[in-house]
Amino acid sequence: MAQPPILSLEGIGLQQGGRWLFGGPGTDGLNLHVAPRDRLALIGRNGAGKTTLMRLIQDLIESDRGARKVKPNMRIVMLEQEPVFDGYETLADWALADRATSDGALAGDHAPEEHEVDAIAGQLGIDMSTPAEGASGGEKRRAAIARALAQDPDLLLLDEPTNHLDLSAIDWLEDWLTRYKGAFITISHDRTFLKRLTKATLWLDRGALRRKEVGFGGYEAWEEQVYAEEARAAEKLDAKLKLEAHWLERGVTARRKRNQGRLEKLYQMRAQRAAMISDSGSAKLKLTTEEDFKSKSVIVADKISKAYDGVTIIKPFSLRIQRGDRIGIVGANGAGKTTLLKMLTGELEPDNGTVTIARNLSGVMIDQQRRLLAPGKTVRDILAESGDWLDVRGNRKHVQAYLKDFLFDPKIVDTKVDILSGGERSRLLLAREFAKASNLLVLDEPTNDLDLETLDLLQEVIADYDGTVMIVSHDRDFLDRTVSVTLGLDGSGRVDVIAGGYADWEAKRRAPVGKKVKAAPVKKETTISAASAPAKTHKLSYKDQRDYELLPARIEELEAAIERGEEILSDPELFTKDPQKFANISKGLENARTEKDAAEERWLELAERVEG
């Protein structure tokens, strides 16, 4: 028998910034029922209102309509994405403070028992006497987890719980939540975390909340089914409504199909790397000359090492990185990831050995402490210096077209950045940095604050990037989708070089002693080549070959035509002034979109055949 809910939201509507974030007039409002053992993933695009919904559930904000009902004596605790530690001397002072108000507005945020906090903090490896002011993001996140879990909540609200955590802490949290007897709702960009823990999915989309009794592993298939049903329904609407029917959603399926093609190419690159690494640990270069090989090298590290206060961080290590490599760097906090990255990029001198960097190497660094956007500036100011056009890696592009590339509605071009969500601001910063001309892209924890669709986009942009990419991340799924070689640091100073992603490194670490694993023990030099063996091509017919060569240009023409048509139809007076022109352009737009979708599918099919 189904148990009664411990919390219900019924007919909820909420206004924000003069608009209805969800549940506006003319709708039934937002409804949610949480059962005692629910494990819910809360999914939605940046700016959809996920964190706002969490705060409403905890009763930190009031809705403009509808009712919130909670079973008596239920304790609801929220792990915030960015808790504020101002005014507290140590992490312990912050964690043990009683922040419940006299009117009960924060009834679920009472001071936990000190021994409970200490027990969890010990398991997480955090010293709670650490001064709050100088604590790192990871230390603050562990302290916040210790406080939240120590309160023994009936309903736990987790807003990006894995941000700033290293792999061991994520494993610990996953294990704790597996044994947890209460209910939880989590917002997370970590696909592996979501797949392992959730049993049902809440999808917040365009002000409505859908629920499906399937964990995150089944979310993408459900999402595509919903969009397909909407597309069929849209066929019954008039041309104007079809124009307004969510250009972004129409791109989801096509983007995922393109990314599947990119994943196949990534797997081929990994196979080439594995073939170059012999059982003895030395690297072999195939199908290229030594001169060609050296000319493609962008970073060469020779027997580099680093120690701090007598503790070895990086043992003697050699590596050759080639143009086009996708390098992932993984390991626990304190294992030396940032140290290794800084030595390879020339920011930090090794104690021993040398690092040689190609003279023409020009890098863009996107770190986890992303630079703040100037308050009061508009999106146009940030991207195009207040103009209409910007240079995107040497190509001129209209600012509104570029916004669409990064999943923004072009209409936000003159919106102040202050009112964007945290995730939207992170995406805007990515858009600005990716526009810069470079041949080395360095990403330090790039997935923080990004929604799942933006992660798909980031994967796509990295795959299409012409230069070399280096990524430090704890996001296991993102690494598995993105990198061709993993540098794994286990904390002993040793650096493993593995052809593949995080899962490949984890498999190597867990392999029984004596079992052969395609890994790269650090020896004299480990050599990596991004383009050592061209993919086997499959012969095409004359017609197929012409389609393969000409379709990209045709797709660009269709995209330009669609953009022009949408710009014309954006005039709200056009339908009244000239209904025939409106109808003609609408029909042309429909035809152009249909042809573009067919052309993309045809080219993808041919590309897969060409690339084997």
Image (spheres, grey):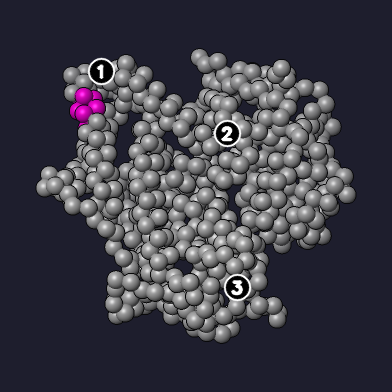
In the visual, does 227 lie left or right of 91?
left
Q: What's under tag 1, amino acid-wise?
A: Thr
Q: Residue 321 in the image: x percent, y percent?
A: 42, 71
Q: What's under tag 2, amino acid-wise?
A: Gly
Q: Which mark is residue 494?
A: 3
Q: Residue at x 61, y 17 (%)?
A: 11
Q: Which residue is mark 1?
A: 576
Task: Say if residue 141 shows up in the picture.
Answer: no
Gap between marks 3 and 2 measured at Cα: 37 Å
Q: Residue 239 in the image: x percent, y percent?
A: 28, 20
In the visual, does 240 lie left or right of 281?
left
In the visual, does 440 lie left or right of 104?
left
Q: Residue 375 in the image: x percent, y percent?
A: 52, 49
Q: Nearer the viewer, residue 346 or 567?
A: 346
Q: Extreme front residue here?
A: 514
Q: Nearer the viewer, residue 467 or 83?
A: 467
Q: Residue at x 59, y 68 (%)?
A: 514
Q: Which mark is residue 564?
A: none
Q: Looking at the image, is mark 3 or mark 1 earlier in the sequence?
A: 3
Q: Residues within 10 Å of mark 1 (few under 14, many from 20)?
A: few
Of circles 1 and 2, the one toward us is 2
**Secondary element type, mark 3:** loop
Q: Which mark is residue 215?
A: 2
Q: Extreme left residue here?
A: 542
The secondary structure that dominates the magenta segment is helix
Q: Extreme bottom residue here?
A: 352
Vertical order, 538 against 400 (above or below) = below
Q: Residues within 10 Å of mark 3 (few under 14, many from 20)?
A: many
Q: Residue at x 73, y 20 (%)?
A: 3
